[in-house]
Image: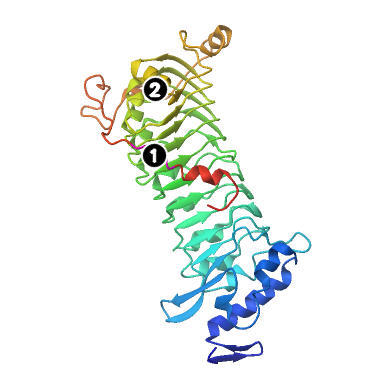
Amino acid sequence: PPCKFKTNSGCFRNERQAKAHDVIQTFKSKILVDDNSKKFTKTWRGTEVCKYKGFTCDIRPDVNERAVASVDFNGAKFAGPNGYLPLDGFIDKLEDLAIFHANSNNFTGTIPYEVSKIKYLYELDLSNNQLSGDFPVNVLKATNLTFLDLRFNSIKGLVPKQVLNLDLDVLFLNNNNFEQRLPENLGDTPVLYLTFANNKFTGPIPSSIGKAPNLLEVLFLNNKLTGCLPYEIGNLSQATVFDVGTNQLTGPIPYSFGCLKKIELLNLACNEFYGEVPEIVCQLKNLQNLSLSYNYFTQVGPACRDLIMKKKLDVRNNCILDLPFQRSEAECTAFFSRKLYCDRKDSFKWVPCMKGGYNKYKHSSPESTTSSSTPSLRTYSTLIPHRL
């Protein structure tokens, strides 16, 4: 390359590439040498860092210089010789990064503080690593982030409520060890895709969720959520996937769910929901999969029975007398002899997308006229450790 910048390591196109070269060589010395890592590290020779496997260069806008802008270590399986491979001294020293993707490696520890100073960092994917400790609050200061993926790690404790104020499109925190109530300011988030699945979140779903204007897919399955569903969920007019399966939620399905006009997949299975299944929900035109099994529902109307026939509605293991594969009479009697209680009882019949607001669905059906074939289910791919 033209020798614009000379160091002990050789000739470089500019100082930024020279710095990146030294950072990469230091990182290389910490990696356990094996067949996987060699596929990458054998190319990390010479001064042409932009040609190293796993690194891509681009023009940094504010200085108009070519620099290392992207790291793609997805599936590289890098590890340290003693099982310890810190991010410190690597990600934080690559100051020109815009994208850092390192799914399925063995990075340990936490995310270094200096990450917050990387001006153009907008995608950070450290999923399926061995990160531990508390939520890495340093990322909260990385103000240009739009994509944050920390799923499949061992991060514990609390998710700071400020993370919901970041201008993210994607927030994937599933399969960690978070133990807390869902943050009350859930509705502040601008994200499109939100997965908190497979953690230990507790308490009710905050009613503020109805204010999250952009939510397309929400996965809260397999936590320890309790309480009744807030009718405000019906305000998620763009949502295509809503999954709260395998929790300890209870109460009836709010009629407001009939306002989820774009919903394709709705999973409420394995909870303690009861009452009738609202016809207004079964009439939603885009609905492909409504899973209500392992609850205590007692009644389904004609539109819902039609969905059962089409294999779009699963109501096995409930308390619906004239349907097969239901719970025993003893189980149902025992459940209904308990004190069943929901706050804001009046709100369950409220249908916010309808004139007048209360349940008038028998005369006017709120569903959209378009129909889609199969759910997109982008977030479900987050439930496998691999890269997206």
The boundaries of the magenta stretch are 372-376
Residue at the disc numbered 1: 240
- Could you tell which of marks 1 and 2 lies nearer the N-terminus? 1
- Please count the marks in the image: 2
Asked where in the image residue 363 lies, by quadrant, the reply is top left
Residue 39 appears left or right of 376:
right
**Image quadrant in which the N terminus is located:** bottom right
| On screen, residue 137 above or below 332 | below
On residue 96, the disc is none
Residue at the disc numbered 2: 307
Q: Is any atom of residue 229 visible in this view?
A: no
Residue 131 appears left or right of 229:
right
Please name the amino acid that badge 1 sits on.
Thr
Q: What percent of the width, then of the height, locates residue 96?
A: 51, 74
| On screen, residue 348 above or below 240 | above
Please name the amino acid that badge 2 sits on.
Leu
Q: Residues within 10 Å of mark 1 (few under 14, many from 20)?
A: many
Q: Is residue 374 magenta?
A: yes
Q: What percent of the width, then of the height, locates residue 134?
A: 62, 52
Dot 1: element: loop
Tell me what residue is drawn at x 49 percent, y 13 percent: 319
Dot 2: element: helix
Q: Is residue 237 magenta?
A: no
Asked where in the image residue 329 lies, by quadrant, the reply is top right
Secondary structure, magenta segment, majority class: loop
